[in-house]
Amino acid sequence: MILKNKEIDLAADAVKIEEETAAVEMAGVNVFYGGFQAIKDANIKFSRHKITAIIGPSGCGKSTVLRSINRMNELYPGCRTEGEVIFQGYNIYGSDVDPVKVRSRIGMVFQKPNPFPKSIYENIAWGARINGLRGDMDELVERTLRQAALWDEVKDKLHQNALMLSGGQQQRLCIARAIATGPEVVLMDEPASALDPIATYKIEDLMEELAKKYTIIIVTHNMQQAARVSDYTAFFMVDENRTGYLVEFGKTKEIYTTPKDKKTEEYISGKFG
Amino acid sequence: MTALPPLQFEENLSGRHRKSLIMRFVFQASTIIGIIALTALLYNIITESFGFVAVENERDPDALIGGGAPLQEAGKDALAAVLREHVSEGLIRRLDAERPLVDRSRQELYDLVVERVVNPRVVGSWTLAESLFEKRKILLTMSEEFPGARLVFRSWLRPELISKPQSSVPERAGVRTAILGSLWVIFITVIISFPVGVGAAIYLEEYARDNLLNRVIQTNIYNLAGIPSIIYGMLGLAIFVRALEPLTSGSLLGLADSSTANGRTILSAGLTLALLVLPIIIINAQEAIRSVPQSLRHSSYGVGATKWQTVWHHVLPASFDRVLTGTILAISRAIGETAPLVVIGASTFVTLDPKSVFSKFTTLPIQIYQLTARPQAEFRNAAAAAIVVLLVLLLTLNASAVLLRNRYSKKKRML
């Protein structure tokens, strides 16, 4: 098992946990697709400016959990979410909350790179513009692309179509697009699964950098990746009704070294999944 | 554990190749049949549009002016004198009332003399094929049947066909009013059916929930696309011509055309054809919108776009070339549509250009139908030429739409 080579002062860390406030908190979240329950009673506190990985076997509803955090689930026909997701002190499923606002504050990066079929510049600027950004758009584009470690590669071709970029570049552009609207939380749904190892490495590197400013929640089926990049890990499993549920949540280091649940241990040691 | 029997392959490669060769010929044959049918159609139209005609003058043009001077060289006064000599006083008064003879130009007077006095009439006509390959036979017939006639090679597809209104005399028959009528009607059809059709498609694809009501609506649209066009004619007659007569005749707005005085107007025809093509446009636009990948919508919603921003900035631009293609196909159908217009009462004989959407109208297909139904054989030549005009009109409209679409999809690829 490849563990993240981070020197952690355990004692200092224990104090920090108390100080850490949750950026997003899921409380009793149930998700249904029509009559089928996809997620049962998920309770997770996602720490601010940390990377939390959601892992689990195929079909356990990792992506569904992720999408419930910024109400993207509503775009799927027949999908219904119960429970609360607390963000900035509000339940985002409250009747007075606008999902459009939620999605501009909680950005999302998808499994397959899906830049807009527009110019690189427009990919960044469009989201900011529709969200009513006033100010220097050129500056925003440059700053965002720099944050996404893409500026040097694209600064000479900002007005070319984004689809001409390589897959890894496209995905970093999508990350840049997600942070251009100034979110607090960035959700990533298997962001590197369609990429080659070098592009994957760049994305992982970028995530660590971004965690200084943003809270990152990542779904991955790659356990090594979760171990490498994340601070916290949530392990989901699927029961006999194919309903996903949270088995264990904790510091990544603890989950990988001293899992409390037997299923977690079996999964991370590669016995199934 | 018993061993499985070894797999037996009977390859029969030559048989499989033979079969694919046969299928290749079958498909080739279907293509060839299509090409033959198309060629036959074009041959028929072309051969009817050109050919020899036997022309007989009622009066010899060169004998009209004293001294045997040719008519072409006669002066304005001489032409006026010829007119007064040979035409009834009633007609002269009518012509004077339109515009006094003295005010008319020499060319106008010459045309009048040719039309009213010389009065050349086509007494016999031959197709292009006959003209090319059986000239001897034609000359024989000429000398036997029309000894006084001249043999002239005529293209029925001539500028006058487009510039002249309808006439009861085949050699003067034009389709100008029909072309204008078709253009007016199609204009109304496009401006109504395109926005409404695309709007409905956007609603059904992007906004409508998947419930019973919307499924019923969707099924109905599919069925409406297959309803015979004449039924739409009945609908148009009941709604636009009769029920909404004050509106479609223009009398509500005080714009009624004095020659119309009822609902059988360009507006009624355009609205009826708009209804006819609406389901086709909706279905095609829906297919186009559905073909936009879901991931594009998600990426738009993901940065906090509203539904409208997603549709306007991403879904429509990504599907617009296909939406246009579907609309072009639907409009092409409307241009050639005849039955519903007959039902709502297209005029069969219109000599005045349509002035507004409240004018009575005729369209090219109706005109062609009328021409073929006339007893004189020469009208069939005029009909063939009119068909060429219709095809050219159709192809021009299609080509311009395709150009527009290509420019659009190119722009999409570039940026």
Image (cartoon, coloured by chain):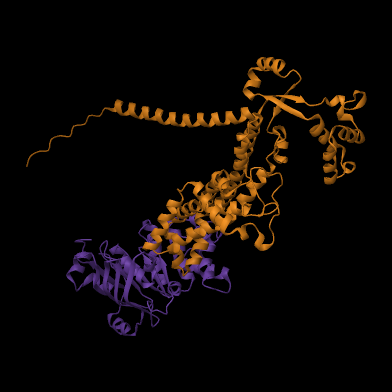
Chain colours: A purple, B orange
Q: Position of residue B211 (x, y in %)?
A: 37, 63
Q: Residue B415, can we see it? A: no
Residue in the image at 71% along x and 41% along y: B165
Q: Considering only vertical position in the picture, is B396 above or below B132? A: below
Q: Quarter holding the N terminus of chain B? A: top left
Residue at the limit of the structure toward the left, as seen here:
B1
Residue A256 lies left or right of residue B383; in this view the side is left
Q: Considering only vertical position in the picture, is A85 above or below A158? A: below
Q: Considering only vertical position in the picture, is B173 above or below A160? A: above
Residue in the image at 55% along x and 31% along y: B41
Q: Give B146 or B23, whichever is nearer the viewer.
A: B146
Residue B374 lies left or right of residue B207; in this view the side is right
Q: Quadrant of residue B25?
A: top left
Report how many numbered discs are placed on residues in the image: 0
Q: Position of residue A234 (x, y in %)?
A: 28, 71
Q: Position of residue A245 (x, y in %)?
A: 24, 70
Q: Residue A78, can we see it? A: yes
Q: Give A18 or B356, whichever is nearer the viewer.
A: B356
Q: Quadrant of residue A94?
A: bottom left
Q: Position of residue B166 (x, y in %)?
A: 69, 40
Q: Quarter holding the C terminus of chain B? A: bottom right
Q: Give B253 or B214, whichever is nearer the viewer.
A: B253
Q: Considering only vertical position in the picture, is A197 above or below B395? A: below
Residue A150 lies left or right of residue A136; in this view the side is left
